[in-house]
Image (cartoon, grey):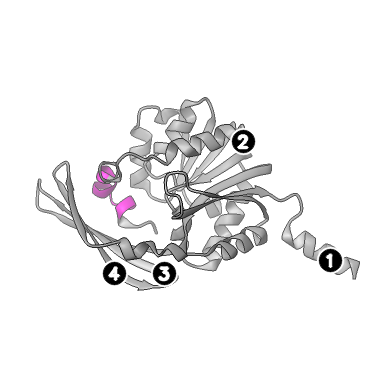
Amino acid sequence: MPDAIFAEPRLAAVYDAFDGERGDLVHYVAIADEFGARSVLDVGCGTGSLAVLLAGGGRTVTGIDPAAASLEIARSRAGGERVTWIHGDAASVSAIGADLAIMTGNVAQVFLTDADWAATLRGIRGALCPGGRFVFETRRPERRAWEEWVPRTETRDGVERRFELLDVTPPYVSFRYSFRFASDGAVLTSDSTLRFRDRAEIEASLTAGGFDVLDVREAPDRPGREFVFVAQVASITTDARSHGRQAAK
């Protein structure tokens, strides 16, 4: 189930106000341009900021997210009618023949178990065309970003949001957002847990999931803090390679 910050309608409605300007989005649009992508799958599209930007460039864009409340915001955006919105998760996405899948906002870290991450990779691979690319970001665990996550409170549009770190048990980090609405005094909370995988672990999982790792880049807007992985659907899957090695013996 998606965290309340995305799934609760009142929280989804104020998400963008607190998220602020997404400086990373222009970099992902540039990546779509770099690869000449005409059909893009936005995995964990949330409130649709990136998907609408991509569709504005004339691309065929599909946004998928398990949080229905976030998708309602996405559909209502200017330009949202250009995007095909799917309520669901990447593990069950259909074969849409996209030539690029993008996953921003460190969505890769919400998959806590190896099984869920592997199922997500299989789903994304199945949604891509032969040779299709998959680009996503994830925080570098050695950077220990959580050591900078101090309690803080901020207010936007009559809503007060407080952040607190709950637990650090690497590779898992848990935190809470609490929201107080001035209009009626309501308080809503959202707890989240992220998994910090290292580069070697991610590369191994991509290979096992049927991808070739083409490049591992710095996040342009957060150098030294995050990796941006560029992978491509492998022409020969891991199982086929293994079968070939066995047959050669």
Which element carries disc 3, helix, strand or loop?
strand
Label 3 vs label 1: CA separation?
36 Å
Residue at 43% of width from left, 62% of height from top? Answer: 143
61 on left or right of 10: right
Q: Amino acid at mark 2?
A: Phe
Q: Amino acid at mark 3?
A: Tyr
Mark 1 Cα shell of 10 Å, populated few (<14), some (14-19), many (≥20): few
202 on left or right of 68: right
Residue at the outermost front position? 224
Q: Earlier in the sequence, mark 3 or mark 1?
A: 3
Q: Earlier in the sequence, mark 3 or mark 4?
A: 4
Mark 3 Cα shell of 10 Å, populated few (<14), some (14-19), many (≥20): some
Instruction: Name the residue beneath numbered marker 4.
Output: 166
Instruction: Name the residue beneath numbered marker 1.
Output: 245
Q: Say which mark, if any, is on residue 172.
A: 3
Q: Which residues are magenta?
A: 5-14
Instruction: Name the residue beneath numbered marker 2.
Output: 35
